């Protein structure tokens, strides 16, 4: 649907702060009209034990995740994020990279993970090369050119979500490169294990821990906090030291517990920006790897 692509291109010209204000309205609109959305949101917040008033701002934040996409995906590649994104803890990433360890950026559905990925590639790419990420083609044909434009920006490279793509990540990390993983994304059947997350067993990916165990890469907890409208973003980076990420003999279940514990820690730091309506309880889909 070329019409959608043209619409995205037009919306990309709108100032980001305006689109964020639109996102606030969108977030509350979805909350108002969708009982299922509200049930999932409230159930996940209640299960976490986080006070509801701290999570409530996430209703508006979820709308901004959507409203920011035209600007994030379609702005010219020459238009940088300089001045829009500040960094907190970049020295941890730089230290690991200069040590030749390679880095796995562990970035869950908090804040603006799309802008976070682009900001990391833009800031660190000139010194450390491309960030290589797994990329699943859009299921809708009209989305493909939009998503492809977002995934092929300077110093941001993608590889397919196949065994070949995973091997590419392993080679990248062993060579001292870096990648980013969404650790709270529900993987296809056979690519995860059941592990507790805020007190409930959820199907959790094994990929992140396996990559760390096989390559010795440093895991960095990362979330791109959305600051008040008009003030940009702050990308936080913290090293996650866990013996389970260094020992290949650790079971997948034990490692998944640690992964979820790391996500929980980040969510507690920014409960008003977590995508609470993302259904971590859902059953994994069946999908074959090529």
Image: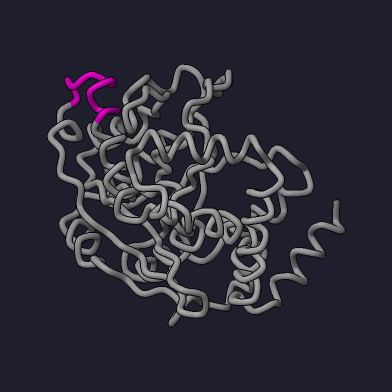
Residue 174 as seen in the image, left or right of residue 118: left
The quarter of the image holding the C terminus is: top right
Q: How is the image coloured?
A: one colour
Q: Nearer the viewer, residue 12 or 103?
A: 12
Outermost residue on the bottom side: it is: 83
Residue 126 seen in render: yes
Q: Picture coordinates of residue 121 (x, y %)?
A: 42, 63
Above/below status of 140 relative to 257: below
Q: Picture coordinates of residue 200 (x, y %)?
A: 36, 25
- Going 54% across and 38% down the picture, which residue do you hit? 160
Q: Nearer the viewer, residue 272 or 278?
A: 272
- Going 23% across and 64% down the picture, which residue do you hit? 94
Q: How many marks?
A: 0
- Going 63% across and 61% down the picture, which residue do you hit? 69
Q: Nearer the viewer, residue 194 or 251?
A: 194
Extent of the magenta region: 248-257
Q: Main secondary structure of the magenta part?
A: helix
Q: Is residue 252 magenta?
A: yes
Q: Picture coordinates of residue 220 (x, y %)?
A: 26, 51
Above/below status of 86 relative to 155: below
Q: Picture coordinates of residue 52 (x, y %)?
A: 41, 48
Outermost residue on the left side: it is: 243
- Image quadrant in which you'd find residue 238: bottom left
- Going 56% across and 54% down the picture, which residue do you hit? 62
Residue 124 as seen in the image, left or right of residue 94: right
Residue 163 seen in render: no
Q: Is residue 94 magenta?
A: no
């Amino acid at each position: 649907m070329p019409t959608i692509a043209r619409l995205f291109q037009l919306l990309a010209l709108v100032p980001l702060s305006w689109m964020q204000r639109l996102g606030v309205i969108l977030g509350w609109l979805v909350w108002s009209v969708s009982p299922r959305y509200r049930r999932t949101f409230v159930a996940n917040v209640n299960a976490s034990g986080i006070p509801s008033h701290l999570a409530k701002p996430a209703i508006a934040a979820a709308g901004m995740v959507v409203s920011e996409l035209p600007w994030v995906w379609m702005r010219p590649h020459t238009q940088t994020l300089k001045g829009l994104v500040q960094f907190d803890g970049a020295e941890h990433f730089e230290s690991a990279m200069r040590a030749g360890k390679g880095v796995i950026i562990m970035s869950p559905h908090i804040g603006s993970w799309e802008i976070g990925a682009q900001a990391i590639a833009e800031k660190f790419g000139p010194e450390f090369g491309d960030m290589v990420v797994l990329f699943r083609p859009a299921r809708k044909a009209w989305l493909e050119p939009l998503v492809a434009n977002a995934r092929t920006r300077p110093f941001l490279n993608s590889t397919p979500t196949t065994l070949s793509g995973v091997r590419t990540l392993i080679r990248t990390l062993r060579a001292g490169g870096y990648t980013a993983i969404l650790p709270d994304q529900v993987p296809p059947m056979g690519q995860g294990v059941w592990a507790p997350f805020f007190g409930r067993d959820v199907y959790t990916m094994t990929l992140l821990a396996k990559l760390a165990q096989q390559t010795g890469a440093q895991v960095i907890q990362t979330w791109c906090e959305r600051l008040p409208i008009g003030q940009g973003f702050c990308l936080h980076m913290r090293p996650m030291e866990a013996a389970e990420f260094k020992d290949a003999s650790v079971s997948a279940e034990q490692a998944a517990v640690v992964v979820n514990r790391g996500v929980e820690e980040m969510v507690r730091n920014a409960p008003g920006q977590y995508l609470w309506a993302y259904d971590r309880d859902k059953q994994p889909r069946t999908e074959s790897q090529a």
